[in-house]
Image (tube, grey):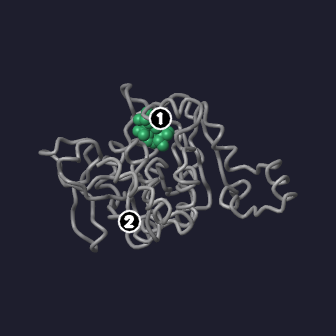
Amino acid sequence: MTSRKPIRKAVFPVAGLGTRFLPATKAIPKEMLPIVDRPLIQYAVDEAREAGIEQMIFVTGRGKSAIEDHFDIAYELEVTMTQRGKDLSVLGPTRLMPGNCAYVRQQEPLGLGHAIWCARDIIGDEPFAILLPDELMHGRPGCLAQMVEAYDQVGGNLVSVLEVPREDVSSYGVIAPGAEVSASLTEVTGLVEKPAAADAPSNKIISGRYILQSEVMRTLEDQEKGAGGEIQLTDAMARMIGTQPFHAVTFAGRRFDCGSKAGFVEATLALALEREDLGAEVRAMAERELGRST
Ligand code: UTP
């Protein structure tokens, strides 16, 4: 019987080392790097809040305390800004409901699956969302809100997917699509991690948003007990296909891979160009730069 408990909890795995961004990420978590003026983690938390998530669970590691500070009250800053008559509303989204955020430590970065498993006791027996903050999902409504709408229809487990050129699939998890429920919602019959282009079951890659039933934690637990190596979330999800409904939502919006330098720059440019307060200035700058480089 499909569980239709509401999705109230979201896990944000933020314990990775961020080696692709060194030296920037030596002392600053990758998730605190800003796109224009909001850190990556703030985009993900805002997306979760918009989708109705009540409890934010961060899986952190050593050197990640800036994330906890970001979602706390900066008392001195607020007092000083108030004394100077400055508007505090810009800090509003950084406030989480007291008691509704939790931090658990992943002592060693043993992979995404292991990071999610570290949140098992806080998740309990509820379905939950996962948002990878280094994938910036840009659209209205947000990606997780689109997925929650689909969840209300089909329940079970969902991943968000994007279509990419077939030659690019080998860096991602790829779905084997089954029956189409609607233009943007497809049944999933299989999941393959990083297949060769020729063997890939489709060109639909899993992007960094998931809604999963709590049973996935037991599967991750079995992997934990098994032979060493990285604990893969895709493998754990694949084992749930056939035992529970599993669907993919094609996200109507753009995904920026901010874990890569080029994706990070692309997101910065795209979001700056859209801004009312910056767009015209940034466009003029970009055109000047392009003129110079040709
Ligand atoms: P990535 O695969 O991008 O790894 O993780 P990374 O360590 O952050 O970055 P690089 O590859 O060294 O540059 C995707 C997400 O999963 C989290 C990361 O923090 C990131 O948000 N993660 C990854 C963990 O929480 N724990 C892990 O063991 C691995």
Q: Is residue 33 something one can see in this rendering?
A: yes
Query: Ligand 1, what quadrant?
Result: top left
In the image shown, does 8 or 29 lie closer to the viewer? 29
Crowding at mark 2 (Cα within 10 Å: few <14, some 14-19, many 20+): few
Residue at mark 1: C-beta within 8 A of ligand 1: yes
Residue at (24% x, 55% y) in the render: 164
Mark 2 is on which residue type? Gly
Residue at mark 2: C-beta within 8 A of ligand 1: no
The local secondary structure at tag 2 comes to loop
Q: Is residue 276 left or right of residue 86?
A: left
Q: Is residue 163 left or right of residue 216?
A: left
Residue at (46% x, 47% y) in the render: 134
The image quadrant of residue 270 is bottom left
What residue is disc 2 on?
Answer: 253
Residue at (36% x, 53% y) in the render: 207
The local secondary structure at tag 1 comes to loop
In the image shown, does 13 or 36 lie closer to the viewer? 36
What residue is disc 1 on?
Answer: 18
The image quadrant of residue 83 is bottom right
Looking at the rendering, in which quadrant would you find the N terminus? bottom left
* Sooner in the amino-acid sequence: mark 2 or mark 1: 1
The image quadrant of residue 260 is top left
Mark 1 is on which residue type? Gly
Residue 209 screen position, x and y as percent: 42, 55
Residue 171 screen position, x and y as percent: 27, 42
Total residue callouts: 2
Q: Is residue 115 something one can see in this rendering?
A: no
